[in-house]
Image (cartoon, grey):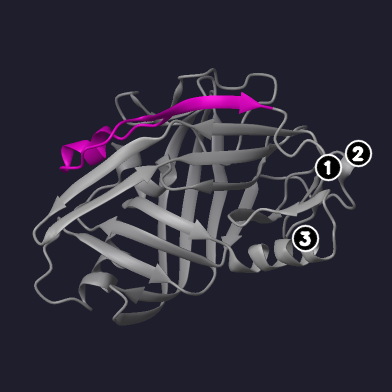
């Protein structure tokens, strides 16, 4: 983890080693922000910031806010984050090229760094790419309502096992992403782990947007079948300019993305004094 949030967490804990897993329950809003800092020679620097509000460490120690931030190097030609030696650490979560979608079995998240820390797991790879997901329904987000078709990408399902001093942590990891058909911008999705999360020390999480779920329930009670809310990460704001074909308004051009979710449970490790994404 980055040093500042790591110290903030460890200050609340007694006798916690730096290589232990720490469980966070977040009852407030979670904002995941991507900013393109610089693009040069088909290389982009991407700042990723994760803001957690109303945080409970092990459901016992309260923190009003935790903010974690790091910078990743994105190879635009390969559309992969890379470390200093050029090895791939995964595809960016927030964007795909609609004209060059990732092929099946291609890498989504490289889990080797977690494996070296003691976890038993596998890389996440592309399992399915489709245009048929929610093909008959409008998709609501906090930013705006999108029209079909969408680009749907799902990952493989892989086991995740970590032996602890007092037991073990076991889970199955799986992600899916829904992208805008025209621009390839992520508009909603559910993801347990991403390259951006790993670069922040977040090794596994479970997200559920209760507000979006409530809005979806209201639509169903009204009998509205062709309009949806996805109870996961949803686009909150962006300054990417979308075509007018499915937009009620277009923002200023630029490269900035915000996603929000109402509750997330994250497992973090405080072992890092350096950022994974920077080698």
Point out residue 239 in the picture as x, y percentages from the top left corner.
Answer: 72, 50
Q: Secondary structure at mark 3?
A: helix
Viewer-closest of 100 and 263: 263
Which disc number belongs to residue 249?
none
Closer to the camera: disc 2 or disc 3? 3
Q: Secondary structure at mark 1?
A: loop
Point out residue 45 in the picture as x, y percentages from the top left corner.
Answer: 49, 39
Which residues fall within the magenta stretch? Answer: 108-130
Mark 2 vs 1, N-terminal side: 1
Left or right? Give the position of 122 relative to 228: left
How dense is the environment of label 1, judged by Cα within 10 Å: few (below 14), some, or many (20 and up)?
some
Distance between the alpha carbons at the discs numbered 1 and 3: 19 Å
In reply to whether residue 125 is colored magenta, the answer given is yes
Quadrant that contains the C terminus:
top left
**Discs 1, 3 touching: Cβ within 8 Å:** no
Q: Residue at x 43, y 56 (%)?
A: 206
Mark 1 vs 3, N-terminal side: 1
Which disc number belongs to residue 245?
2
Distance between the alpha carbons at the discs numbered 2 and 3: 26 Å
Which residue position is annotated with label 1? 147
Total labels drawn: 3
**Discs 2, 1 touching: Cβ within 8 Å:** yes
Point out residue 50 in the picture as x, y percentages from the top left corner.
Answer: 46, 59
Whether residue 140 is visible, yes or no, is no
**Discs 2, 3 touching: Cβ within 8 Å:** no
Q: Residue at x 79, y 43 (%)?
A: 241
Point out residue 212 in the picture as x, y percentages from the top left corner.
Answer: 66, 63
Q: Residue at x 54, y 29 (%)?
A: 40
Does residue 214 lie above or below 163 as drawn?
below
Distance between the alpha carbons at the discs numbered 2 and 1: 9 Å
Closer to the camera: disc 1 or disc 3? 3
């Amino acid at each position: 983890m980055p040093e500042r949030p790591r110290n903030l967490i460890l200050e609340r804990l007694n006798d916690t080693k730096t290589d232990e897993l720490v469980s966070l329950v977040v009852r407030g809003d979670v904002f995941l922000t991507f900013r393109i800092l610089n693009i040069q020679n088909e290389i982009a620097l991407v700042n990723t910031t994760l803001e957690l509000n109303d945080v409970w460490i092990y459901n016992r120690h309260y923190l009003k806010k935790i903010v974690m931030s790091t910078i990743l190097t994105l190879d635009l030609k390969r559309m992969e984050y890379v470390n200093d030696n050029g090895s791939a650490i995964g595809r960016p979560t927030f964007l795909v090229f609609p004209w060059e979608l990732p092929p099946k079995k291609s890498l989504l998240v490289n889990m080797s760094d977690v494996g070296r820390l003691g976890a038993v797991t596998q890389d996440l790879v592309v399992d399915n790419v489709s245009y048929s997901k929610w093909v008959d329904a409008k998709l609501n987000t906090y930013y705006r309502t999108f029209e079909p078709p969408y680009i749907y990408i799902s990952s493989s399902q892989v086991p995740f096992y970590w032996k602890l001093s007092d037991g073990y942590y076991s889970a199955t990891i799986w992600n899916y992403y829904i992208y805008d058909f025209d621009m390839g911008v992520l508009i909603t999705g559910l993801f347990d782990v991403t390259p951006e999360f790993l670069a922040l020390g977040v090794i596994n999480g479970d997200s559920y947007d209760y507000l979006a779920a409530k809005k979806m329930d209201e639509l169903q009670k009204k009998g509205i079948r062709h309009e949806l809310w996805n109870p996961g990460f949803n686009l909150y704001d962006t300054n990417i300019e979308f075509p007018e074909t499915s937009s009620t308004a277009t923002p200023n051009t630029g490269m900035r993305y915000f996603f929000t979710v109402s509750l997330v449970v994250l497992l973090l490790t405080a072992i890092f004094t350096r950022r994974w994404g920077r080698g």
